[in-house]
């Protein structure tokens, strides 16, 4: 869910069009900047994102989600990830991506593998339930 900004539920930025797209998804992947670029804390970004989803449609919070920690090569990222995991213990899986060049083909392939594995776990849990 990269690209969702504060006020999206009021049609700010990509707004309702993007939120309608997210609503059709069965499984959400939330990419979070663990380095805190732009002076923001990752946990505040996560809370804002969840708030925007809830304000648009509260049922969107029922969707399973995977939080992917991004910018893990930055010095502060490891500490921020620890804090994030502590604050959101029940959030589910948090996967770390530590590559400096996260848009190279090998990194994208690893990211896809992580997401596919999490989605398979979700599908298996759905079929059991």
Image (cartoon, helix red, strand yellow):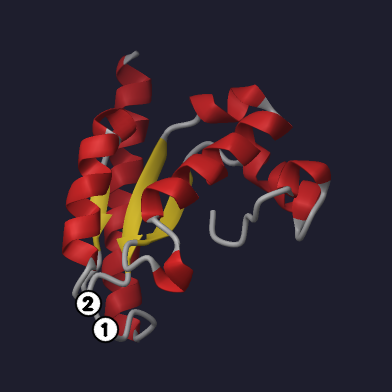
Q: Quadrant of residue 89?
A: top left
**Picture layout, residue 92 above or below residue 72:** above
Measured as percent of width and height from the top left, residue 127 is found at: 35, 21
Q: Quadrant of residue 111?
A: bottom left
**Picture layout, residue 91 above or below residue 84:** above
Q: Which mark is residue 127?
A: none
Which image quarter holds the C terminus? top left
Does the rendering let one see residue 29?
A: no
Question: Circle 1 is placed at which residue position?
Answer: 100
State the residue in front, 42 or 27. Answer: 42
Task: Residue at 39% x, 82% y: name it.
Answer: 103
Task: Residue at 28% x, 28% y: name it.
Answer: 90
Task: Residue at 72% x, 52% y: name it.
Answer: 18
Measured as percent of width and height from the top left, residue 57 is found at: 69, 28
State the residue in front, 71 or 29. Answer: 71
Q: Quadrant of residue 20?
A: top right
State the residue in front, 90 or 118. Answer: 90
| Discs 1, 2 touching: Cβ within 8 Å | yes
**Picture layout, residue 126 above or below residue 72:** above
Measured as percent of width and height from the top left, residue 55 is found at: 69, 31
- Counting other residues with Cα less than 10 Å from the Cα at mark 2, is it few (<14), some (14-19), or many (20 or more)? some
Question: Circle 2 is placed at which residue position?
Answer: 73
In the picture, measured across the screen, residue 63 lies left or right of residue 124, that is: right
């Amino acid at each position: 869910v990269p690209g969702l900004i504060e006020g999206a539920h009021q049609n700010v930025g990509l707004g309702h069009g993007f939120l309608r797209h997210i609503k059709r998804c069965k499984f959400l992947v939330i990419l979070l900047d663990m380095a805190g670029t732009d002076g923001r804390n990752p946990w505040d970004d996560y809370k804002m994102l969840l708030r925007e989803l809830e304000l648009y449609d509260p049922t969107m919070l029922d969707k399973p989600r995977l939080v992917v920690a991004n910018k893990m090569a930055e010095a502060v990222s490891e500490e921020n990830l620890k804090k994030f995991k502590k604050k959101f213990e029940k959030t589910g899986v948090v996967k770390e991506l530590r590559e400096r060049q996260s848009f190279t083909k090998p990194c994208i392939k690893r990211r896809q593998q992580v997401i596919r594995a999490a989605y398979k776990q979700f599908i298996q849990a759905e079929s059991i339930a």
